Amino acid sequence: MEQMQTVQEFIEILEELIERSRNIPFTKTASIDRERAMELLNDIRLNLPEEIMHARWIEENEERILNEARLKAANVIADAERRAMAMTMDHEIYKKAEEEADMLLEDARAEARDIRLNALDYADEKIEETESMIREAMMNMDQQHKMMHDYFSQTVDILYSNRQELRSEQ
């Protein structure tokens, strides 16, 4: 089986398979290679866009990403506290150290908050992209399903009509 790069290419091959299918005499129906069509549908499933896989990875690893951000923030805070304790030699140095420690803690908290918010924004963006792609795929599948349903309904109607004609000739 040849390797394709995109789902779109598989869809185009499937369309070509349908277009080149053999017509069944006296009907508007055609016969297609079922095995080939199923292979193409399987290839489509296996080659979903990389963004979907990436968004799934982010969704599955969201807690790990947040924990890493929390750990980094905790390390920054612990480092700031250690530096503050080292500056307690006399009152003036202590006062200055306390102010610096407060600023470092505030900066660390702000950085931790920013990291967490950025991670959440990134995860939300990727999940939104995935949701959009899945909605589009669902719409395409619904449209294809309706077309197939209409096609089979017409085929059943034609077959029923043909049977009725055959019975009336008896």
Image: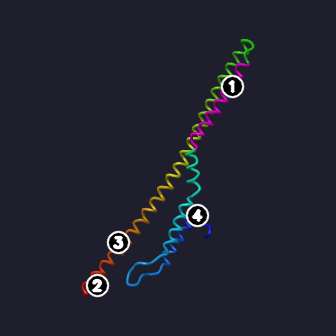
- In the rendering, at what x and y percent does residue 127 appear? 53, 48
Q: Position of residue 46 (x, y in %)?
A: 56, 60
Nearest-to-viewer mark from 3 and 4: 3
> Is residue 88 depicted above or below 63 in this figure?
above
**Seen in the image, is 105 located left or right of residue 86?**
left
Q: Earlier in the sequence, mark 2 or mark 4?
A: 4
User: Mark 2 or mark 4: which is in front?
Assistant: 2
- Mark 1, residues whose alpha carbon is within 10 Å: few (<14), some, or many (≥20)? many
Mark 1 = which residue? 80
Q: Going by the image, does 27 lie left or right of 81?
A: left
Residue topped by disc 2: 166
Q: Which residue carries the number 4 mark? A: 6
Which circle, 3 or 1, is nearer the viewer? 3
* Residue at 38% in and 84% down: 26
How far apart are the alpha carbons under marks 3 and 4? 32 Å
Name the image quarter holding residue 9.
bottom right
Crowd rating for badge 2 (residues with CA inside 10 Å; few <14, some 14–19, many 20+): few
Residue located beneath label 3 in the image:
153
Q: Amino acid at mark 2?
A: Leu
The structure residue drawn at horizontal position 65% and vertical position 25%, both measured from the top left corner, is: 103
Against 106, residue 117 (above or below) is below
* Residue 138 image point, x, y percent: 45, 58
Helix, strand or loop: magenta stretch? helix
